[in-house]
Amino acid sequence: MRQILFIHGGDTFDSHEEFMAALSTYSVDPYAKMRKWRMTLQDELQGTYAVLLPEMPNKQNASYDAWKLWFEKYLPHLHAGDVLVGHSLGAAFLIRYLSEERLPISVSGVYLIATPFFCEDSPAGGDFRFNTRSLQQVLGNTKNLVFYHSEDDQVVPFSDLRHFLEHFPQARTMIFKDRGHFVQESFPELLEDLRGAF
């Protein structure tokens, strides 16, 4: 069965104080019922696809080491040719992980949506920061690297995509004008790419 492992987003902080300050600014709508595209991927893809949606630990104040440990629990269940997808912090996690580790299997593609450029000099990113000198190792895990970014993203600046393309000029990009941070009900362009990945 063809498998897609999806790593969702979250928040990470450099200190407990930063985390608490961010929590105090969050607004909550307990009645919001918007369906997100990641939750409908399985239904949309149908057929012989299986979408794995691990809940990464403590997404409100994520730790790279905890996410790495949890992610590696899924690796024995993947097969050569499967696909990795990451959104926001999930995409940043995949960048750091794939720049430091070698997957036990080769994946047919890594699809990164609204990816923050958390390099070693970044003022944000907590322990999800990566070393730019190691970025080329990502391509040892896959030759098919795709970035999706929207010019109006209010969470991850569009300039972050340009930084990634300086390191990965061979990557394919899909640039949008009005998708924000890709918190939407459907993502037809990603679905089309995933169908073509196998």
Image (tube, grey):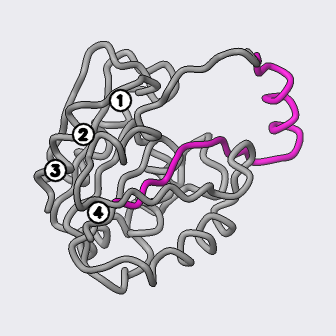
Q: Residue at (25%, 78%) from the top-left corner?
A: 106
Residue where numbered disc 4 is placed: 83
Q: Earlier in the sequence, mark 4 or mark 3?
A: 4
- Taking depth in this image into account, of 132 and 188 the one nearest to the observer is 188
Numbered label attached to residue 190 = 2
Labels 1 & 4 near each other (Cβ < 8 A)? no
Q: Amino acid at mark 4?
A: Val
Observer-side mark, 3 or 1, equals 3
Measure how far apart labels 4 and 2 are at the Cα level.
Answer: 12 Å
- Taking depth in this image into account, of 90 and 165 the one nearest to the observer is 90
Above or below residue 54? Residue 44 is above
> Percent x, y for residue 117?
44, 44
Q: Would you identify the image quadrant in which residue 190 lies? A: top left
Measure how far apart labels 2 and 3 are at the Cα level.
Answer: 9 Å
Residue where numbered disc 1 is placed: 159
The local crowd at label 2, few if under 14, some if 14 to 19, many if 20 or more residues have their Cα within 10 Å, is some
Q: Amino acid at mark 2?
A: Leu
The N terminus lies in quadrant = bottom left
Observer-side mark, 2 or 3, equals 3
The local crowd at label 3, few if under 14, some if 14 to 19, many if 20 or more residues have their Cα within 10 Å, is few
Q: Amino acid at mark 1?
A: Ser
Q: Residue at (30%, 83%) from the top-left corner?
A: 105
- Region of the chain picked out in magenta, as a range: 4-28
Q: Amino acid at mark 3?
A: Arg
